Image: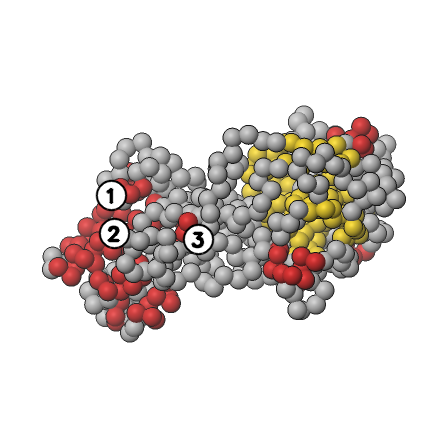
Amino acid sequence: MRRLAGSLLLATIVLLLVGFAGHASAQKLCLDSTQPQIPKDQLQICGQYNNESCCTNPRAVEIAKKLAEHSAAMGANPAAKNCLRALEAVLCAECDPYATQLYSRDRNGRYADVPYLCTAQSNRDPVESQPFCSTVWDVCAMVPIPKNPFVATNDPRYISIYDVYLTKGEFCRRFMPPNKNPGDGPKICYRGKPVDYPDELGEDVLPPVNDMCVEQIGLSTKNEKSVENSYYVAMTPHPDQSRRAFFLERAGRLFLYDLPEPGSSDYLPSDGGSTFLDISHLVAQGVEQGAVGIAFHPDYPRNGRFFVSFTCDSSVNSDCKAAVCGCYKDVDCTPEKVQAANPDGKWGAGDLCRNVTVVAEFSACSDTLCTPAKISQQSSIEPTIVRYIVRLGQPFINNNGGQIRFGGDGMLYVMLGDGGGEWDPLGLAQNPKAFQGKVLRLDVLNGISEPDDNEISSRGLLGAYGIPPDNPYAFAWEWRGEVFALGFHDPWKCTFDLLRPSVMMCGDVGW
C-alpha cells in the first residue's frame, strides 16, 4: 500500500466504461478445480465435448467402461438401449466446462453422481421436445439398472428408478436445481448436451470487446466532506446498473456519485457525492492503513448486503478486537521476534496485534421489508456492522493488503499482505499456518452454516464464514483451509481474467 501516499493525493479517478453493466457470471470450472481444456485427441466417448472439455481421454475411457458395465447388466432389449443413451448423456455431464455448476455437493465436498436435470423446456431450443428430466424418466424409469446412479441406495432390491420414485414429478424434483435464493448465483441445469451459457439462463450474450475507453471523470481532491490526508482507494459501479458509482475514501467514507454522461467532458461534483456510509470512527489512520476495500454481494440489488475492508485499532475500538492474532507460537512468531524486527517502532508500537485487519458486513436494508426499489433509492445508511467476516491481528502497521472482491464462483476473496515490517521478517507469507501473505477464499453466502462466536474461537476462524470444501487446502493437515493462494508481499489490487474467470491476477509490491 505504500504507493498510495503523497503524490496520489490528487490521483485522477478514471471510469472504465467497458463492462460497466453487471451480469451474473457462471464460472467454467471442472470438478477437480482445473480449467476446461481442448482435448489433444478426440474423446472416445462424450464426443460433444471435443471442442472444450473437463475430460481427458483417460477419463473418457473410464466413463466408457462404466457405461459398458451398465450395458452388459441391462441387456440388449430396445428399452434398455434407449435408457443407455440417456445414461451416457448423464455420465458425460462431468465433461462439461461448467461442471461445478451442474452438481450438488455434500458437507464433505463430494460431488453428486447425477447433475441437476432440467425440469423445464428450453425456450431457446426449438428442437427440444420436452425437458431432459422427463426424457430420462420416460426411457429409464422402468428399466432395471444395476448400480443405478439415480438411486441413492446400495439395497439390491432397488435397481430401477420406479422402485424409489413413484412419479415423474417426484423424480424430477429430486434432481432439479435448488431454489434460487439471493446470492446463490446462476442456477444451471443439464439438458443432455453441453451447457450453452448464458443462453441457458435466458440472458443476452455480451458482444466481444475489442477496445477499451478510459475517460477522466473527477479528481479525489479534498473537499468539505473529506478528511486531511485522505483520498479515494476504490471505485465500483452501483450494482443496480444505474449511472452511479461508489467511491471509497481511505478515511472511511463511502460516497455515492451520479456519473456524468459519456462524452460530456463533465467532472464529478466538486462538493462530493452523497455520503452513503461513514465508518471513519472505526478506521485507524496511518501511512498504510485506512479503509481499503469494498465488495457488493452478487445479489445486492435484492438483499442490500455489502462488505468493507479496513484497519482498526482495537485499543481504541474494542469491538474490532482480533478473533485471531496473526503472530502466535504455531507460526513461530513471538513478541520478542516482533520487537527485534522493529527496534525503533517504525512499523508500529504498543500491544501486539492491536492493529486489526477487518472485513465487516453492512446492509442497505434498514428493516425487514427490503425491496429492490428501497435498496436502489438508499442514499445514506447507518454505520451498523451486521457481522464481522475477518478480524486478523497484525504484528505491524504496514503491508496488510486488504482488497476484497467476489469471484464468479460466488466466493469472497480477501487479499492479505505479509503482515509488515521489512522484507517479511517473520516469514509469514510462506508459512502454511499463517494467514498473512495469502489470498483467502471464503463462503459468506452459499448455504454453509455460519459459525457462532464459540465455534469461531474453538476453530481458530477469523470471523463468520464457511470454508469452501473445494479450497486447495481445505482438508490439508497443518494448512489454513481458508487459503486460496500464498507467497504474497502486499497484494493491493487483484482481478479475474474475463475470458478465463477462474484465473486471478494480482499486482504485488515485489521485493
Q: Earlier in the sequence, mark 2 or mark 1?
A: 1
Q: Residue furthest left?
A: 77
Q: Which three-letter amino acid code belongs to the residue tagged 2?
A: Glu
> Residue 462: x, y in percent?
66, 52
> Residue 99: x, y in percent?
40, 48
Q: In the image, is residue 8 above or below residue 121?
A: above
Q: Which residue is mark 1?
A: 45
The CA span between labels 2 and 3 is 26 Å
> Residue 427: x, y in percent?
67, 34
Q: Earlier in the sequence, mark 1 or mark 3?
A: 1
Q: Which residue is mark 3?
A: 202
Q: How is the image coloured?
A: secondary structure
Judged from the image, the secondary structure of the residue bearing numbered disc 3 is loop
Q: Residue furthest front?
A: 264
Q: Which residue is mark 2?
A: 88
The CA span between labels 2 and 1 is 9 Å
Q: Are marks 1 and 3 in contact (CB under 8 Å)?
A: no
The reply, left or right, for residue 260 in relation to residue 477 is right
The CA span between labels 1 and 3 is 29 Å
Check the picture and name the quadrant holding the C terminus: top right
Residue pictured at 69% horizontal, 45% vertical: 245
In depth, the one of 334 and 184 nearer the eye is: 184
Q: In the image, is residue 124 above or below residue 179?
A: above
Q: Quadrant of residue 465?
A: bottom right
